[in-house]
Every structure is written in structure tokens, then in C-alpha cells.
Image (spheres, rainbow, N blue to C red):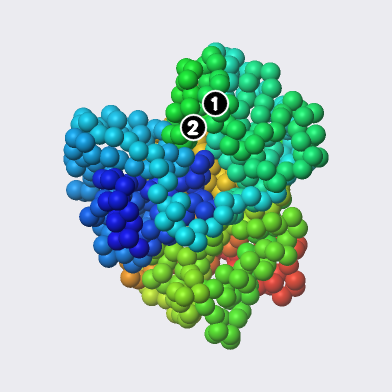
């Protein structure tokens, strides 16, 4: 595949062609139409950038995907392991190789404006940029761009009208002397306009652009994805519908100062703008990260239902192991069947990771019909979640099946220690994720082990399972210097991943809440949202301190109290055993 594409580069006289993992909106997960990098390289992980020259090809991805990419990439593509010693970034690579007269190509509608700006900063040679979608004709059976029906998300689940949210944004625009605001990120559009759809896998969003001015707003949707009722409903809130691609012309006609995030806007769109650009984070990022009382009440309800589903699944798994044949696909399907029985369930919140033994060492492993494992004695890691109309869930449990080694129990327990330490954190207001990350990471750092990913991420409300601007990780991303505010939801998910052996992860969602305020300031802590047992069969009790045992026992008591009313008598008896005090 890549060899044929390199022939095309020669024909078009392009020296470097960049293929990001993006759509027109820089979404984290993209639809089939936008799976260009996967189509050309063979690597189907959710993050990575492909660089193709007429003679060579390179794929940059992060530590979550090193093992997977090494297995999937075509032999002629060099894997560039991001943030590893001696491995240049793609910008550093290009700065070292691009020469005078070279042509750099990319699809301008899927490339971020910020990346092109950074490219201009690092290249001090005379080069040419060519915005061209070379894959349009090269990919003969390319799927269509998704155009599912869009709809308005019912206020009973979130508590604020689109008009109310837009007024908050317009006040922010006035404070920053901006006459217009362009939004291209789908989760921001979905939250602001209470718009939902089915154009992105596992994320209930619709492909759309938005423009907010000081007196009206415009929503840009594909023809056929909305009806007259939607048009009329939005008109009542001074929101007007326009065609999806009209945003490019409307952007060219703007006057005054326009607020947008160059990190999230595609290069082609920014190129149309003739007026002054105010580069800043979309204000909706901060607004939607703090859940209101209606959202909190609903998401707690969603997590109870999800806890019931996963607990019922755990009972089934433990009681049917070695009695029936199990593999990663059948077990994943069984978990989905339990979720599907819950009220208001729509779909998974991401592709389920159901990984047995060494497969779980690949952090974002996905079993396929062509490539999956049968399940026998050992560790089974399942990272999964659900999109419910009343909330979004994300949970990981590592299940012990049959015999496991002392080494596996040791790492299972060390991960649990970090998990409990973060879940029970007590901290002063003003702390960011970086302040707390070491709590989860220290128990395994003490053994000179690390997990090459963050410890926690924000979670949307019937929206993206990964949401900013906050997060918990050992280094700060550009947007993650945001203090943890009451109402934010964040995950707690440390792990151990040993290549060729096994992977272990425990994960709960947590709600940031206020504690005591005194002369030292406002203290904060977490309220747990996720209620499913930690598998006691994996714990080396002797490694736990008295405080850690107390924390686990308190958590398991809450699991039983919240989940048992929805179980059968047999399931209740089993749950009492799996939440017993240790």
C-alpha cells in the first residue's frame, strides 16, 4: 500500500506528505471516512502521525501503542517512539531533513493550524506547502463521510438550554473584546448547542461547525441530518441552521476580532479568515468540565446502572469460567449484553479493551475476529464504558481467573495501592493533576516501573469519554494547568504493563468535591462514582497497610450497599463474599 502511495508522491512532486489522525474537527476518535493513516500504514491505534516521502515512511505514536504499532505497521514504515531518548519529534525530524525547494503536502481540512505554525517556526529553508487530499482518489473504496441524524439532547438530563449556555459564552466574548467565536470541536458544539448525533464512534456527536456572534448563532450541519422541527426549535433560541461547508465562506466574511482555538481549528478554515484572530481555548471547555447539579445527579444514576451491569458480568464470569469456552470476543459481547439491559443505555463509550494475559500489556489492545485469544487461567483486563442518556461511564477491572503467580498478585496489589491513594486524596484548592499524580504512581515507581500514559482524564456528560481541560499525569500538557474544581469528573487508573507477560489496571471515575474550609484554605477531595468490586482473588493482603485495608473495606461496603438492591439473591450472596472485609 505505502509503496503505491509513494509513487503518487513522485507523480505530484511532493517531498513530504503528512497524515495526522484527525478529521475536519480534530476529534480524538474519527469515523471510517477519516481513517487515512490506518489505511495507508496498517496501524489502527487511535493516535499517531504518518510521514511519507517518495522513498521512506515514518509513524510517530506514543507509549500506549509501541507494541501494537510494531506488530501492525508495514515493514517499510519506521516506528518513531514518541518521547523516547534519541527519537526526534516530527517537527525536529522535518527541521533536519527539509531542504530548499522541497514541497510539504497535507490535507488542509484535517491538519491543525497550530501544527503548520509550528512547522514554519522550525524550518528556516525556502519550502512550499501544498494543501491537497491525495487520498481522495487513491483510496478507491473509501467510506462516505458519516451523516447520521442529529437531535437535541433533552434538558432533563443536563439542566441548561442552549440559549443559556450561549449567553455565558457571549459574556466571555464581550470581556475579551471579540465580536465572533468559531467552534469546530464536536464536543464543544454538542455541549453548547445541546446537539447530539451518531457521526463519531462511541461519542454521541454530530459533524458540525458553529459560529457565535454577539447577537445570534449559527450551526452548520450536513444536508439531510436535520429536519424542520430541529430548525424551528433552534430558531426559538436565536440559532440558525446553515450548510456544513458554508462555514468556510462565512469565516472569510467575518469582521472585528474572532475568538478560536488554533490548536483545534483546521488549517484550511483559518486560512479563510481575513480579520484579527484571538487565539484561546474555547470557553466551553472550562464551562462543560464543571458539571451542574442536574448533571451530577444524572451521572450518579448512570454509574449505579453501570455498576450493576459490570457486577452482574463479574458474577457471570467467575461462575462460568472453565465451565464454558471463553475468548476475548465472547466475553466482551457478554459484558455489552449486561449493559444493554440497563435503562437509557445507548452504546459503549469507547471500543472495549478485553485483553487476556500478555495482550493486556498493550494498553489499548482491541481483540478482533481475526486476532484474539481464548481465556484460561491468568489475568483478564477489561477497560470499558457506556454512553447512557444520563451520563458517560469508564471503568477498568482486572479479573483473576484460576491460578495466578505470586508476581502477578504482587503487581495487582501495588497498582491497587496507587489506585486507593489517589481515590482517597485530600488536597488544597489550586492543585492541578500534576500535584496528585505521584500518589497513584509512587507504589510502582518504588519498583522502578512506570506506565507510559496519564493516570486520569476528564469525562464528558453523555459526551466524549476523554474530556479536558483537566487531567492527572506526571507532566503538564498545554491545557492541563487547570485547577481541579468542584464538579469536575476525573478517572483514577494506574497500571502495570509487562510486555509479553500481562497487564493490570484498576479504574474508577471520581467527582471533585469541596471539603473543609479553614485558615489554611479550601480543602478538596474526591467522591467515588464507580461502584464495582476489586477482585479480592488478586490481592496480596500482607502488602497492604492498615490504612489501605480500611480504604478498600469502606469502598467495598459502599459497593454492596449501592449495587446489591438490583441483584438476584444468588448474585447478592456472591457479592457479599467479594466485598467482605479483609
Q: In the picture, residue 314 is in which quadrant? A: bottom right
Q: How many marks?
A: 2
Classify the position of the N terminus by image quarter: bottom left
Along the line of sight, the residue nearer the viewer: 549 or 329: 329
SS state under label 1: helix
Which residue is at a point 43% across and 39% down the rendered structure image?
A: 108
Estimate the x, y position of residue 335 in percent, counting from the top left.
62, 68
Give residue 301's position: percent from left, percent from top.
71, 50
For the point 79% across and 39% down, the residue is: 228
What residue would you read off at disc 1? 251
Q: Residue at x 67, y 43 (%)?
A: 223
Q: For numbered disc 2, what is the local secondary structure?
A: helix
| Measured Cα–Cα span from mark 1 to mark 2 | 7 Å
Q: Are the two marked residues, 1 and 2, in contact with CB atoms closer than 8 angstroms?
A: yes
- Location of residue 368 with respect to 221 vertically, above or below: below
Say if residue 224 shows up in the picture.
yes
Number of residues whose C-alpha sits closer than 10 Å to that of mark 1, classed few (under 14), some (14–19) or many (20 or more)? many
Q: Earlier in the sequence, mark 1 or mark 2?
A: 1
Which residue bears the numbered disc 2? 269
- Spot occupied by residue 466 in the image (x, y as percentages of width and height): 52, 46
Residue drawn at x 26%, y 62% as measured from the top left: 76
Amino acid at each position: 500500500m505505502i509503496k503505491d502511495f509513494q509513487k503518487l508522491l513522485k507523480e505530484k512532486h511532493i517531498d513530504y506528505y503528512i497524515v495526522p489522525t484527525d478529521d475536519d474537527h480534530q476529534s480524538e476518535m474519527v469515523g471510517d471516512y477519516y481513517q487515512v493513516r490506518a489505511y495507508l500504514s496498517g496501524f489502527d491505534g487511535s493516535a499517531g502521525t504518518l510521514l511519507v516521502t517518495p522513498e521512506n515512511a515514518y509513524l510517530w505514536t506514543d507509549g500506549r501503542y509501541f507494541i501494537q504499532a510494531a506488530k501492525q505497521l508495514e515493514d517499510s514504515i519506521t516506528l518513531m517512539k514518541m518521547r523516547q531518548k534519541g527519537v526526534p519529534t516530527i517537527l525536529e525530524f522535518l527541521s533536519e531533513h527539509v531542504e530548499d525547494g522541497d514541497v510539504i503536502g497535507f490535507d488542509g481540512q484535517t491538519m491543525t493550524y497550530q501544527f503548520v505554525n509550528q512547522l514554519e517556526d522550525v524550518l528556516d529553508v525556502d519550502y512550499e506547502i501544498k494543501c491537497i487530499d491525495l487520498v481522495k482518489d487513491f483510496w478507491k473504496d473509501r467510506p462516505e463521510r458519516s451523516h447520521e441524524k442529529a437531535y437535541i439532547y433533552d434538558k432533563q438530563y443536563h439542566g441548561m438550554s442552549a440559549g443559556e449556555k450561549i449567553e455565558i459564552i457571549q459574556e466571555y466574548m464581550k470581556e475579551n473584546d471579540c465580536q465572533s467565536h468559531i467552534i469546530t470541536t464536536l464536543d464543544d458544539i454538542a455541549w453548547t448547542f445541546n446537539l447530539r448525533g451518531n457521526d463519531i464512534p462511541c461519542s454521541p456527536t454530530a459533524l458540525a461547525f458553529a459560529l457565535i456572534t454577539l447577537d445570534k448563532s449559527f450551526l452548520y450541519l450536513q444536508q439531510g441530518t436535520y429536519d424542520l422541527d430541529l430548525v424551528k426549535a433552534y430558531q426559538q433560541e436565536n440559532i440558525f441552521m446553515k450548510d456544513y461547508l458554508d462555514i468556510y465562506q462565512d469565516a472569510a466574511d467575518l469582521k472585528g476580532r474572532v475568538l478560536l482555538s488554533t490548536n483545534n481549528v483546521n488549517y484550511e478554515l483559518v486560512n479563510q479568515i481575513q480579520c484579527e484572530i484571538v487565539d484561546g481555548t474555547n470557553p466551553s471547555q472550562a464551562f462543560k468540565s464543571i458539571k451542574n447539579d442536574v448533571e451530577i445527579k444524572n451521572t450518579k444514576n448512570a454509574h449505579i446502572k453501570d455498576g450493576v451491569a459490570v457486577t452482574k458480568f463479574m458474577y457471570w464470569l467467575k461462575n462460568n469460567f472453565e465451565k464454558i469456552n471463553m475468548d476475548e470476543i465472547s466475553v466482551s459481547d457478554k459484558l455489552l449484553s449486561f449493559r444493554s439491559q440497563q435503562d437509557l443505555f445507548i452504546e459503549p463509550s469507547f471500543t472495549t479493551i478485553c485483553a487476556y494475559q500478555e495482550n493486556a500489556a498493550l494498553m489499548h489492545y482491541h481483540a478482533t475476529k481475526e486476532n484474539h485469544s481464548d481465556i484460561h487461567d491468568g489475568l483478564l483486563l477489561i477497560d470499558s464504558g457506556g454512553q447512557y442518556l444520563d451520563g458517560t461511564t469508564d471503568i477498568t477491572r482486572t479479573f483473576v481467573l484460576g491460578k495466578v503467580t505470586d508476581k502477578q498478585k504482587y503487581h495487582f496489589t501495588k497498582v491497587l495501592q496507587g489506585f486507593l491513594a489517589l481515590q482517597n486524596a485530600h488536597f488544597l484548592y489550586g492543585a492541578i493533576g500534576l500535584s496528585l499524580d505521584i500518589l497513584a504512581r509512587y507504589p510502582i515507581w518504588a519498583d522502578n516501573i512506570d506506565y507510559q500514559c496519564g493516570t486520569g482524564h476528564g469525562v464528558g456528560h453523555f459526551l466524549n469519554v476523554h474530556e479536558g481541560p483537566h487531567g492527572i499525569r506526571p507532566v503538564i500538557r498545554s491545557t492541563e494547568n487547570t485547577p481541579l474544581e468542584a464538579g469536575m469528573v476525573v478517572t483514577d487508573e494506574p497500571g502495570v504493563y509487562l510486555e509479553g507477560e500481562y497487564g493490570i489496571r484498576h479504574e474508577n471515575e471520581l467527582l471533585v468535591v469541596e471539603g473543609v474550609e479553614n485558615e489554611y484554605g479550601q480543602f478538596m477531595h474526591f467522591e467515588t462514582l464507580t461502584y464495582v468490586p476489586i477482585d479480592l482473588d488478586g490481592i496480596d493482603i500482607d502488602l497492604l497497610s492498615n490504612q489501605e485495608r480500611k480504604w478498600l473495606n469502606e469502598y467495598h461496603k459502599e459497593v454492596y450497599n449501592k449495587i446489591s438492591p438490583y441483584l438476584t439473591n444468588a448474585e447478592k450472596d456472591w457479592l457479599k463474599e467479594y466485598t467482605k472485609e479483609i
